[in-house]
Image: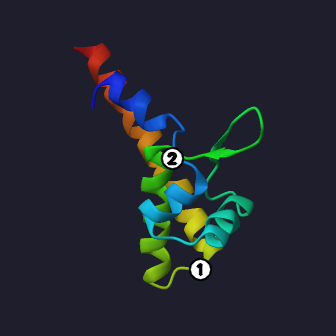
Amino acid sequence: MTQSHRVRSDLGVYSISVASELSQVGLQTLRLYERRNLIQPQRTAGGTRRYSEDDIARIRRITDLVATGVNLPGVDRILALEDECAALRAELDACRAGAE
């Protein structure tokens, strides 16, 4: 993945209704996920939520976990561990690149 693609995937461009449609998750469920700190959509200056491609992917991951029977506190822990693993993997890759 290129840096420019990563920046675009982080950019909040979708309204909550579009994010709901793209992820097939109800509006109230998206708001619940935000209250539980499972997602943190960007906000405009006026306070309107803006969801990125990364947010949509995370919502889909949450949906998959819930569908397998994981409760929201469990989802939160799994996502935190996945995020930590990804950060450690990136750090390892950087160390390996520096050693070459």
Which quadrant would residue 50 be assigned to in this image?
top right
Instruction: State whether residue 63 appears in this view.
Output: yes
Front residue of 43 and 34: 43
Residue at (29%, 25%) from the top-left corner?
Answer: 2
53 displayed left or right of 1: right
List x then y, in percent, for residue 98.
Answer: 31, 14
Q: Residue furthest left?
A: 100
Instruction: State the residue position of label 2.
Output: 84
Query: Is 11 drawn above or below residue 56 in the view shown?
Result: above
List x then y, in percent, for residue 57.
Answer: 42, 54
78 displayed left or right of 64: right
46 displayed left or right of 94: right
Residue at (71%, 63%) from the top-left corner?
Answer: 36
Q: Specify the amino acid type for callout 1.
A: Asn
Instruction: State the residue position of label 1.
Output: 71
Instruction: State whether residue 91 appears in this view.
Output: no
